[in-house]
Amino acid sequence: MSARAPVISLRGISRVFGRGESAVKALNGVDLDVAQGEFVAVMGASGSGKSTCMNIIGCLDRPTGGDYFFCGLEVSRLSPDELALIRRHQIGFIFQGFNLLARTTALANVELPLIYQRVPKKERRTRAEEALAAVGLSSRAHHLPNELSGGQQQRTAIARALVTQPSLLLADEPTGNLDSATKVEVMNLLADLNRRRGITIVMVTHEPDMSQFASRQVVFRDGRPVGDSQKEAL
Amino acid sequence: MFASTIRMALRAIAANLMRSALTVLGIVIGVASVVALVTIGEGATAQVRSEMSAMGDNLLIVRAGAARRPGEPHQDAAPLELEDAFAIAQEIRGIDQAAPSSSMKTIVVQGNTNWSTSVTGTTSAYLPCRSYDIAAGRSFTQTEDNGLKPACILGETVREKLFGNDEALGGIVRIGRTPCPVIGVMAPKGENTMGVDQDDVVLMPIRAFSRRIRGNDDVAQISVSVSDDRSTTAVKASIEALMRDRRQVSPGGMDDFEVRDMKEIASAISEATNVMTGLLSAIAAVSLLVGGIGIMNIMLVSVTERTREIGIRLAIGALRAEVRMQFLVEAAVLSGCGGILGLLLGNAGAYWATRSMDMPFIPSPSIAAVALLFSIGVGVLFGWLPAHRASRLDPMEALRHE
C-alpha cells in the first residue's frame, strides 16, 4: 500500500434526506479509507446507503455531517461549482445506464470532459482516440451510441471516464444493464485498468460475482459499512 | 470553448430541425415584416424625393389666396397678374426663372381625334422651372411669350393620343376653337407623387391662352426656380415681401397669397412616410416579442427533455455557468438563425413589393444589422429563464431523470 494520504477518507459521514419527522437517515456515521491503487467493490442491499455514499464520494452530493477528505483536501463544505471542478479534474464516472449523449458519436462523447478542461481541439482528438483504443473501440469511434451494443456503450463510457486521467474512477452498477458475457468483459477491463495503470476504482454493485473482480469488498447495511474484506484480513 | 459551445448549439438545433424551424417562425415573421416595411418605406421616401425633384428642383410656387388651413384658400383674394411675374423676375435676386401660368381643362382636337387635357398658358420659363425638357422641336420664342399668336408644346401623353405614330411637329391641333401649330414635344416625366400624369399637358403662350381660350387675364400661379446656391427660404421671404408690397397688404395684416416651397412639401411627405413606416414596424416588432415567448417555451421544454444530458455534463464537471451559457447560446443561435431567415425573406418581400410598385429597392445594411442584433437579443432575453433553470439542476437528480 502507498504511504501517501488515502485517495478517499470518510470520517463520521452522515446524510439525512428531508426534515423533521419525515427525515430519512441514509448514511449514519460512515468511516472509510480507500488508498491509491485500490479496487473496492461496495456491496449491499438496496436502501443500504451504498449509492448515497457513492454520490458523496463522487462529489455529486454533500454530506449532512462528518468530514470527507479527497486526496487530502476537505471537500464536504465546498460549493457546487468547486465540487464540479474536482469532478472535472479528479474523478471519472461510469454509470449503470451508460449515460452517453445520444446523437453524439462515441469519439465526441469521450472528448466531452476534455472540452470542459479546455484542452485544445487537436490534443482532445488524440487523447480521445487513445482512450477509445485503450478500451478496444477504435473501430467504432464514429458510431452513435444507439449503433453500439451495451458492452460497447459501457466501454465508451469507461473511455470517457479515463480520458481525463482521473485520480479516482467511480462505477455505479457498471454491469447492471449488461448480459453475463459482456459483464465479464467489462469487469476484466476495469480490473485490467486497475492492475496495469494503478487507477483507483470504487464500484457499487449488488452482484457478488462482480465484486470478486475487485481487490477489496465493503458491505453496507443500514447506512454504514458492516463488512470489509481488508479489515477481516487483518 | 466558445466555438465548441456554438457547435453544440447548432447540433442541438439540427437534431430537432422541424421543431426548431417552427420555434423561430415568430422571429422570422417579425424580422421579415420589420425589414420589409422599413425597406419599402425607404424606397417610397426615395421615390417621393426623386418625383419632387422631377417636378422642379428648388421650386417655389406663388398663388393668390392664403391657405388658412391646408387646402382651403382665401376665397376673395385678387388673382395674380402677369406683372407680378415680371416684377419677381426683375427684382428678386437669386432666382433663375419666374413663370406665370394659368390652366384650364379643355378638349384638344386633331383631325377626328380629340382628347380632354389640361391646357396651360405660360412662358418659356415654365419648362426649366418645372423640369420639362424639349424632346423634339423647340420652346416658345420671346416673341411668342409676349404675343397673341397661338402655338403649342405637347406633353408626351397628349402627343401619343392625338398623333400616335404620326409626326406631331408642324401639325395643327385645335384647342377650343383656336387652331394652334405644334412647335415642340416634351420628354415624358411620368406620374407625380399624387399619381397625376405630368405628361398629360399642353403648353401655350400665356397671352394667347388668356385671350383666346381662358377669356381673362388672371394668373393662377407663378413658378419660381431658385438658383442652386441660394436658400429657398431666403428667396421665399423676399418674394413674400415683394408681393405684400405689390398687393398692398398692410403691415401685420394677413397675406392674401402664399408662396409654397416644394422642398418643404417633399420633406413633409417623406416625414409622413417615415411616421407610417415607424408605426407599422412597431406593430411588426410585437411579433418579435411573441416569437421570443415561443423560443422561451420551446427552450423550457428542451431543458426538461434534456435533463439527463445536463446531469451528464454536470457530473463530468461542467460549471453551472457553463450549462447556462450552453442554453443561452442555443437560444441566441436559434433566434439568430430566425433573424437571418427573416432578413432574407423581408428583403425578398421588399424587392417584390418595390418592383411591383415601381419604386426603388434600397436594402439597408444598418437595418439588417439592427434586425439581426435585435433577434439575437430576443433569444438571449427569453433564453435566460430556461438556461438558468438548466444551470440550477442538481446533478444527481438530473442523472436519475428518465
Image: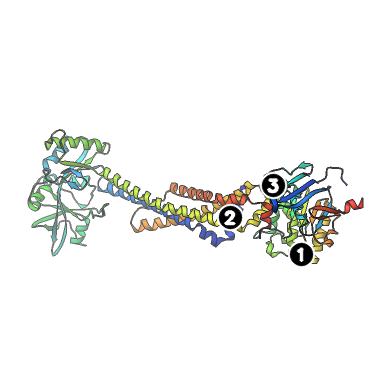
Q: Secondary structure at mark 3?
A: helix
**Does residue B50 appear to the left or right of A34 in the view shown?**
left
The answer to whether dots 3 and 2 both sit on one chain is no
Image quarter where the C terminus of chain B lies is bottom right
Please, what is the three-letter code of the amino acid marked with disc 1?
A: Leu
Instruction: State which mark lies toward you, 3 or 2.
Output: 3
Image point (13%, 63%), residue name? B111
Q: Is disc 1 surrounded by few (<14), some (14 to 19) or many (20+) residues within 10 Å?
A: some
Q: What is the number of the mark on residue A178?
A: 1
* Labels 1 & 3 near each other (Cβ < 8 A): no
Query: Within 10 angstroms of label 3, few (less than 14), some, or many (20 or more) residues?
Result: many
- Label 3 sits on what residue type? Ala
Residue under pointer 2:
B10
Asked if marks 2 and 1 touch (Cβ < 8 Å), the reply is no
Is label 1 in a helix, a strand or a loop? Answer: loop
Q: CA distance from mark 1 to mark 3?
A: 29 Å
Q: Which residue is mark 3?
A: A84
Q: Report the chain holding disc 3.
A: A
Q: Nearer the viewer, residue B304 or B22?
A: B304
Q: Is residue B359 above or below residue B97?
A: below
Does residue B88 show up? yes
Could you tell whether A23 is left or right of B185 in the image?
right
Measured as percent of width and height from the top left, residue B56 is found at 25, 46
Q: Residue at x 34, y 50 (%)?
A: B276
